[in-house]
Image: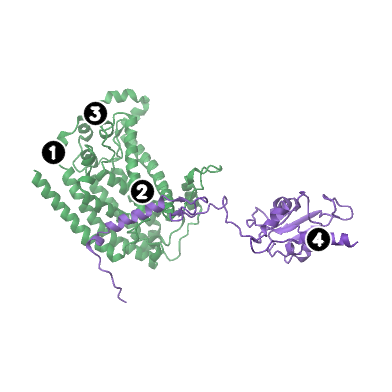
Chain colours: A purple, B green
């Protein structure tokens, strides 16, 4: 095949105009800086550095994202899990292991019959399916936004109860995470449960 | 030995008796020290020009580049200035793999052959005026520029050897391209320097020099590179970049071609030849090619500084444009030289990320049909002007 070459003018063959133009373009990009969040609209026409400094900054995770499953606490900062073991039962890869407290276990909140003596999630096994969250009658376990699960050995990646609770934090966070604006109101099993309890009380 | 303020220098720098005695009895020691000194400056420059390349390329492409590695075992990042350490360590720890199909002896020789010439060039470059009582040039050759051209063109052998010994198609193509390219640009480069010496190698101007300069240049020939520096030391517009802009332009572009930098990196061209001549190399051998390329860039920049931009002088008065009397002044002159080199290195790096690679026929076209006639015309033009002035 014969490639048709465009006939260049004398000035073009000197290459100097295009070299100067190249300097202009590269200068513009070189002296660009990180686009700030605040002035994003104003700066949208400027070139900007697009690198994300990964461990320090992370992608914004969308609402409803299924990250690592953590245990959450209620508003009084006490454990919600009542050791019913439904999540352990439903977990497809058997990543969850719950040790029930036996007859006289400690409870850290009023109204709960029992709390798990040990609650381990093997993060190496977890497949982030979200079944545990769906099955939990107490809304004690939620798949939150964490997607970086790292450790130096396998033992480190079996998260125990304390770790899961501290990572999970308060209930509100889990609740907010699942509220999609304008789409649905998030998971509100507890609202329905409260209502049920009230109804029952009235019924008696 | 017509050094005028020699006694003052002596008093300033107190040196133990046995060292002075040792140095006077064994002059080669001074040369060895100079060689080590140059090496100790050039190697870090090579390392940091790699970092500069990566950072500048990143910034031009709207990235950030390596900004993590700082001082080892601490959290101090220093804008990624520890990167050469990590790179070097990586090269040393990687497997030194020799493919089964290569021609072994040439394969082992090639990296060294491509790296050494770029370092040898530094031997004749006057990188400073005086330090103590020593001229800051390792070998004060009167044929400095010829020596330089001879050595620079040796650099191509490493690449051709690498391409030949690798015994596979892409390195071979790279080697062929390299040889053709080097030959065509070598000629234009040599021609472009002729007008420089038509101006600088004129004995007339040397009579008007200050006594310090005369003492400094005593015994050197007119082709000596220090003499070119002296010619340009007068004022900013005595720099040959202003007197010979066409020669400078051709020389600059030929240096790009000689060092295989974009837009003339056809021997290497990652996209078409999968890295060309160094395809079959790994670990430290590859690093040698890499270091050779950057050392050649530094040597080329040093040549441009000496020939066209006044060497270690600055047109800011006595302190900067006459040979140094004391240690501090000598070091300042060396720093000025390094600074000028850095400017050219920056330019070379910048151009790499700005211009696309030339097609092979375009490259040959520019070399033979443009630069060669233009440089010849430049010689004739300079001759006519000189004749008319005389």
Instruction: State yes or no: discs 2 and 1 in contact (Cβ < 8 Å).
Output: no
The numbered mark 4 sits on a residue in which chain?
A: A
Label 4 or label 3, whichever lies nearer to me, is 4
Q: Earlier in the sequence, mark 2 or mark 1?
A: 1
- In three-dimensional space, the C-alpha distance between marks 2 and 1, rounded to whole angstroms, equals 36 Å
Instruction: State yes or no: discs 1 and 4 in contact (Cβ < 8 Å).
Output: no
Label 1 or label 3, whichever lies nearer to me, is 1
Quadrant location of the C terminus of chain B in the rendered image: top left
Rate crowding at label 1 as few (under 14), some (14 to 19) or many (20 or more) other CA atoms within 10 Å: few
Instruction: State yes or no: discs 1 and 3 in contact (Cβ < 8 Å).
Output: no
Label 2 or label 3, whichever lies nearer to me, is 2
Between B21 and B48, the one nearer to me in the picture? B48
Count of numbered marks: 4
- In three-dimensional space, the C-alpha distance between marks 4 and 3, rounded to whole angstroms, equals 104 Å
Rate crowding at label 3 as few (under 14), some (14 to 19) or many (20 or more) other CA atoms within 10 Å: some
Circle 2 is placed at which residue position? B346
Q: Position of residue B171 (x, y in %)?
A: 38, 64
Let me know if marks 4 and 2 both belong to one chain: no
Let me know if marks 1 and 4 both belong to one chain: no
Circle 3 is placed at which residue position? B3
- In three-dimensional space, the C-alpha distance between marks 1 and 3, rounded to whole angstroms, equals 22 Å
Circle 1 is placed at which residue position? B204
The numbered mark 3 sits on a residue in which chain?
A: B
């Amino acid at each position: 095949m014969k490639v048709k070459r465009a006939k260049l003018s004398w000035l073009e063959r000197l290459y100097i105009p295009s070299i100067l133009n190249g300097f202009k373009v590269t200068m513009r990009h070189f002296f660009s800086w990180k686009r700030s969040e605040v002035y994003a609209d104003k700066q949208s026409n400027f070139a900007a550095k697009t690198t994300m400094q990964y461990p320090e900054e992370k992608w914004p995770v969308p609402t409803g994202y299924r990250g690592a499953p953590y245990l959450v606490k209620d508003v009084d900062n006490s454990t919600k899990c009542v050791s019913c073991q439904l999540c352990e039962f439903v977990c497809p890869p058997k990543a969850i292991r719950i040790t029930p407290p036996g007859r006289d276990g400690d409870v850290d909140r009023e109204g709960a019959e029992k709390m798990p003596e040990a609650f381990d999630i093997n993060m190496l096994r977890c497949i982030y399916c979200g079944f545990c969250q769906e099955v939990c009658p107490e809304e004690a376990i939620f798949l939150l936004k964490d997607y970086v699960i790292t450790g130096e050995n396998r033992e480190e990646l079996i998260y125990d109860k304390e770790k899961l609770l501290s990572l999970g934090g308060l209930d509100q966070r889990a609740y907010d995470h699942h509220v999609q604006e304008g789409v649905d109101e998030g998971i509100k099993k507890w609202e329905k449960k409260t209502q049920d309890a009230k109804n029952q009380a009235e019924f008696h | 030995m017509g050094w005028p303020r020699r006694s003052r220098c002596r008093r300033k720098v107190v040196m133990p008796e046995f060292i002075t005695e040792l140095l006077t009895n064994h002059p080669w020691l001074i040369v060895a020290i100079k060689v080590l000194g140059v090496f100790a400056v050039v190697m870090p420059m090579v390392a940091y020009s790699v970092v500069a390349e990566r950072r500048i390329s990143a910034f031009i492409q709207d990235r950030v580049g390596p900004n993590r590695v700082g001082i080892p075992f601490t959290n101090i990042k220093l804008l990624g200035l520890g990167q050469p350490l990590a790179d070097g360590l990586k090269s040393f720890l990687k497997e030194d793999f020799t493919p089964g199909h290569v021609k072994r002896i040439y394969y082992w020789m090639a990296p060294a052959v491509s790296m050494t010439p770029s370092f040898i060039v530094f031997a004749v470059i006057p990188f400073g005026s005086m330090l103590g009582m020593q001229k800051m040039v390792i070998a004060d050759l009167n044929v400095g520029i010829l020596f330089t051209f001879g050595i620079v063109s040796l650099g191509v052998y490493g690449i051709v050897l690498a391409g030949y010994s690798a015994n596979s198609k892409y390195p071979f193509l790279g080697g062929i391209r390299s040889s053709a390219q080097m030959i065509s640009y070598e000629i234009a480069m040599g021609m472009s320097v002729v007008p420089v010496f038509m101006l600088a190698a004129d004995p007339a101007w040397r009579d008007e020099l200050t006594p310090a300069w005369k003492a400094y240049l005593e015994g050197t020939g007119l082709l000596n590179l220090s003499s070119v520096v002296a010619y340009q030391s007068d004022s900013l517009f005595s720099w040959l970049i202003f007197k010979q802009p066409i020669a400078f332009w051709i020389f600059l572009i030929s240096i790009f071609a000689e060092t295989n930098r974009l837009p003339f990196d056809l021997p290497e061209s990652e996209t078409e030849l999968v890295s060309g001549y160094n395809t079959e190399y790994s670990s430290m051998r590859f690093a040698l090619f890499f270091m050779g390329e950057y050392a050649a860039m530094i040597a080329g920049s040093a040549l441009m500084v000496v020939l066209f931009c006044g060497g270690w002088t600055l047109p800011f008065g006595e302190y900067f444009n006459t040979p140094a009397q004391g240690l501090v002044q000598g070091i300042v002159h060396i720093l000025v030289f390094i600074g000028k080199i850095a400017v050219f290195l920056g330019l070379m790096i910048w151009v790499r990320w700005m211009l696309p690679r030339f097609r092979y026929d375009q490259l040959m076209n520019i070399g033979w049909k443009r630069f060669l006639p233009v440089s010849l015309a430049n010689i004739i033009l300079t001759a006519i002007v000189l004749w008319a002035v005389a």
